[in-house]
Image (spheres, rainbow, N blue to C red):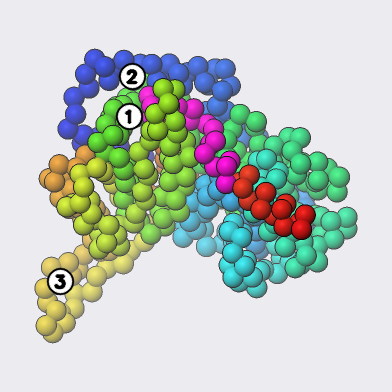
Amino acid sequence: MITYDLQLDWRVDEEANERMTEAFGNLVYEREKGVAGYYNLPEDSKLIVSEVRAFASSNETIRTCDTVVVIGIGGSSLGAKAVDSMLRHRYPEARRILFLENPDPVDILGKFATITKERSLFLVISKSGTTVETMSIFKAVIDHFHIDLDGEDRERIVAITDEGSALCRFVDHHGIKAYTIPHNVGGRFSVLSSVGIVPLTLAGYDTCSLLEGGASMVERFFDAREEHLLIKAAFIATHWKRYRMNVLFAYATFLEDFTKWYVQLWGESLGKIDRCGNRVGPTPSGHIGSVDQHSFLQLVMQGPRDKSVTFLKVERFEKDLEIPDIGLEHIQKSDFVNGHTFNELINAECDATRRSVKMEGVPVDSITLDRVDEANIGELIVYYELLTSLTGSMLHVDTYDQPGVEAGKRILAKRFQKGANG
C-alpha cells in the first residue's frame, strides 16, 4: 500500500480545474488512440513474463547462469536498475544483474573482470537498435569474451529492440533470441515492457506482482480515483516558473537508482519548447535522505525559494537493527536515540525534515510505501509516469519526444566521420 499526502498550500480554482479536466481527457485520448502505449504495459507484459519463464526453463545455458549482463543506456537500463536496487536485499538468491551503460573504459574493464562468460547471459537493449554507446559496448563484449555469434555462444545473447530495427535485423541474421518493444512506448516509459521485464524476470523477481501493482494504479487513475495526481500536476504546471526545481528526497539508500530514473523521465519529457515557442519545464533533482540533509538541504532551506520537494519514505524496512544503548564519554548528546531502531531514526528524520521545509514556506508533498515489494514498486513507477504525462499535457508540450538530444548525436557522428575521411 502507498499513501500519497499533498500538503500544498494552494487552492484549486476554476482555471486549475479546467487544466485538470483537459489533461485527464488528453490521457484518455492517448490511451484509446495508442499515442502512448505505456498505459497498457501492466496488462500486456504479463505474456512476456510467461514467455521468459518458459524460455529460461528450456534453455540449459540460462539455467547455468548466475549473472545477467544488461548492455544499454538511459531508458534501456535505468528502470530495471532502479527495480533491481529496490528489491535486491529481499532476494539474496536472485541472479546478479550487471549494467554496462557508460562508455567509460575504466568502468567497462572493471566490470568485465567480474564476468565469467560461461555463467553469464548478455542482454543488449536498444529501442532504435543503433545507440552508439550500447552498440560500441556490445562490440567490446563480443571481442573481449570471444563470442562466436554463429556458434553455441549465441545462446547466451538476447536482444530487446523495436521490431524491424537494425539490431532486430542483426539478431535475425544470426538466429539470436529477441524480444520487441512496442513502437508507441518511449525508452523512458519502457520499464514495464520487455526492457525491464525480461532482465528482472530472468533475475528471479516476481514481475507478475510488479505488473499487477502498475495495473492497479492505471485502473484507479482512469476510473477517476486518483485525483491527487491531477492536483499535483496542476500545481507543478501552474507554478513551475516560481518553483523551477522539483526535488525528490528519498529516504532509503536503495532508492537512489529510482531517483535517477525519475530525473530522466522528468527531464527528457518536460524540458521542452511549448506550442507557443516558450522554453518550459521544472528541473528534476534526486537526493537521498538522510545523507543529503548534510549537503543539499541547506540550499532548500535558505537558498532561492524556487523549489518544491517530494519526500519518499518506506514505513517498514523489514530489517531490524537497533541503535545500541551505549553511552560514549563526551558524546552523550546523541544518546536520545539509544534503544530505538534505525528504521525509526531515518523515518523520524524524514518527518522532521519535511516539517522544517514546510515551515520555510517550501511546497511539499509525501509518498509513503508501507513496505518495498513488487506491487508497490509497480504502482510507484506508474504514478510517476502518469504524473509526467499529466504535467506535460498541462505545459502544452509533446511529452514523448526528445528533440533536444539529437543535435549532440549529429555532432558526434560528424566528428568521427570527419576523422575517418582523413
Asked whether residue 69 is in view, the answer is yes
| Residue in view at x 76 percent, y 35 percent | 164
Disc 1/disc 2 C-alpha distance (Å): 9 Å
The residue beneath circle 2 is 19
Amino acid on which disc 3 is placed? Ser
**x and y, in percent, of residue 178 in the image:** 75, 43
Alpha carbon distance from label 2 to label 3: 49 Å
Q: Residue 90 vs residue 160: left or right? A: left
Q: For residue 361, which quarter of the picture?
A: top left
Q: Nearer the viewer, residue 357 or 416?
A: 416
Local SS, label 1: helix
Instruction: Point out the tag, 2 or 3, that comes first from the N-terminus.
Output: 2
Mark 2 falls on what kind of element? helix
Q: Report x, y in % for residue 82.
A: 49, 51
Q: Say which mark, if any, is on residue 237.
A: 1
- The magenta segment: 386-408
> Could you say which is closer to the camera, residue 165 or residue 342?
165
At a point 45% along the width and 33% down the height, the residue shown is: 272
Image disc number at residue 334: 3
Q: Are marks 1 and 2 in contact (CB under 8 Å)?
A: yes
Considering depth in this image, is 397 or 44 the residue closer to the camera? 397
